[in-house]
Image (cartoon, coloured by chain):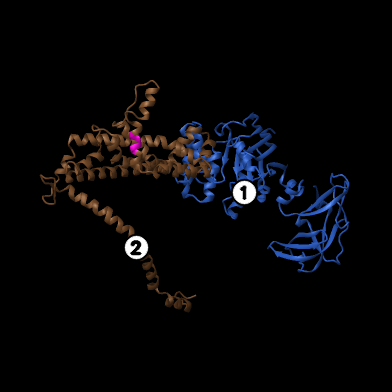
Amino acid sequence: MSEHPLPDPADTIAEMLHQPELESDAVRSESRRGVLIALPSWIYLTLFFAIPLLIVVVYSFATRSSTGLTRLTGWNIESYKRLFDPLVAEIAFRSIVLAVATTLICLAVSYPFAYYIATRTPKWRNLLIVLVLIPFWSNFLVRTYAWRIILGSDGPLAQITEWMGFEPVRLLFTNSAVLIGLVYGYLPFMVLPLYAALERMDWSLVEAARDLYADGWTAFRKVTWPLSRPGVIAGSILVFIPSLGAYVTPALLGGAKTTLLGDYIVSQFLAARNQPFGSALSVAVMVVMLGAVVVYFRSGAKNL
Amino acid sequence: MTDSVKLTGVTKRFGDVLAVDDLHLNVADGEFFSLLGPSGCGKTTTLRMIAGFEFPTSGSLTIRGQEMALNPPNERPVNTVFQSYALFPHMTIEENVGFGLRMKKVAPADIAQRVKRTLDMVQLSHRASASPSQLSGGQQQRVALARALVNEPQVLLLDEPLGALDLKLRQAMQLELKDLQQRVGITFIYVTHDQDEALTMSDRIGVMSDGKLLQVGGPQDIYEHPRSRFVADFIGEINLMPAVAVDRDSVKLLDGQVLMAPHDAPAGRSVTVAIRPERFTLFRPDAEIPSGRSSIAGKVIRRIYHGDVFLYDVDTAEGLLEVKEENRPNVEVFEIDSQVVVSWSPSAATVIED
């Protein structure tokens, strides 16, 4: 056999027939279709998310006139300096404590519940999930007003505790009332991702752990819990973020002495007519949330 | 020999469903025992009761003489190799294999040494720090085996562990498993629906159907002397011919032919004569049949070339008979539609009481 064989005629024909332009055309039209499909969501997100966000960021560097108008001149970072005011620190601290408490209580309540649902037969699972979602069928504001009645000074809670011979419990306009309201409102956001994680769980892994001499609790700690952690992380983020910025619940159930970040930002925009400071607060809260999410995801991913 | 696992009158109900029905079984120490049956026959439930994942509704279950029917799995000296392997996805291979020893609070230095030795045994020490998802199916299977064996259990339970592997690998693993079992000397209880697997590896086989243990015996015994239609039919191919018992040594076929076949059925009782396809021999109609052999005339209606064998369907007065003849130079090959005589020696026939 020679070192350089003559080209096989079949190869030559194949080469002539091979037209790379045709292939790249196909790839290009494929990617163009992709852009087209995503276009509505791009437009929507740009108009109603990116641009308003940009406006908030721009406003946070603007100045407030003596009459409360925002002047888009004389750019400065005064609003950001005000974030270090002890009053702001106190509000931020209270909000974070409340959001962390809400998240932990939701987790503690939801985990056994999600576990229970995930270990039922498929028919029961679906029914129970629907029950979790039923509160969403009525307006959030209406449901929060219902809590005002329950927790109010003559409400059922006060009456029942009095009837039982205790000092009547009146929680309305306290931090406890806000906590109850937040836990109530965000519980489904914890239950659903936990359920999704536990429902996918391969229970033969738990059996394997039991088979390898782990008792029930150890098998949970070593297998079920670590494998459900993606659900714990997703649920915690879904509860923590809206709790930190919650406005309606604290406004309706909290008292004057328990201002939280949400109220405070709203009051800057409305009552104080200080849009630059309100914007700076909003940007700061967003940055903190983003940071928290990144840290949480990182630590979670490492332990998985 | 002592009994490693002993089940006495074990019954398991799931609601209205009777999964295991009054099962009596002794598995000897160091034995390779297979539970064979179609899906839903109760074999996996039986295994799960020995492992402790299910508790019997009634009956007694002892492991090495100790009553264990209601003990949780972590208190039993048995380990399981799961059908899906059930390797912990969030742990490395090494951590998976060491899990049982860590739970038993074995000293860390001992754990490291035993894990290494066991991984050496299954030839996976080089993948010790990999995660299960990085391994092939065959490798995962070996990790599952190592994770169970490292604990030196008294009994190893295997739930169709080769089911997910392809044929070549499965055959290689069958021999490897049998080898390993003889080396470590641990009792293996192996659940499978694959008769080849059971015949290849087992010391004894228990055939199950509908929650009942139908027959227990060595592979040859089960294959050649099935005691029921189900066992005969489930294991390998078999021809079943209805007949009537004449006396203890013979039966009469439907066409009136009397066959020599020893059995215990009383005279006049209807029975079934079972003959494996490979125990038949085909002759030309004019050929002289060796004396002492039974025979029946028929016509070839189908022939399948199978490489090493030819499979014939022969239409006879006793119905369609399947005949398996080796593809060898001195064995005659018959064409479709040719007249033939199907012949067999009396020892090939097993009589099953209906």
- Relative to the observer, which residue lies in front, B94 or A211? A211
Residue A264 magenta-drawn?
no
Position of residue B243 relative to residue A155, above or below, is below
- Relative to the observer, which residue lies in front, A238 or B220? A238
Position of residue B61 relative to residue B216, above or below, is above
Q: Residues within 10 Å of mark 2 (few under 14, many from 20)?
A: few
**Image hue for chain B:** blue
Q: Quadrant of the C terminus of chain A?
A: top left
Q: Which residues are magenta?
A: A144-148
Q: Position of residue B151 (x, y in %)?
A: 54, 36
Give the secondary structure at mark 1. Answer: helix
- The answer to whether any part of residue A83 appears in the image is yes
Residue carrying label 2? A35
Report the chain shown in brown.
Answer: A
- Amino acid at pointer 1: Gln
- The answer to whether any part of residue A304 appears in the image is no
Residue A147 occupies quadrant:
top left
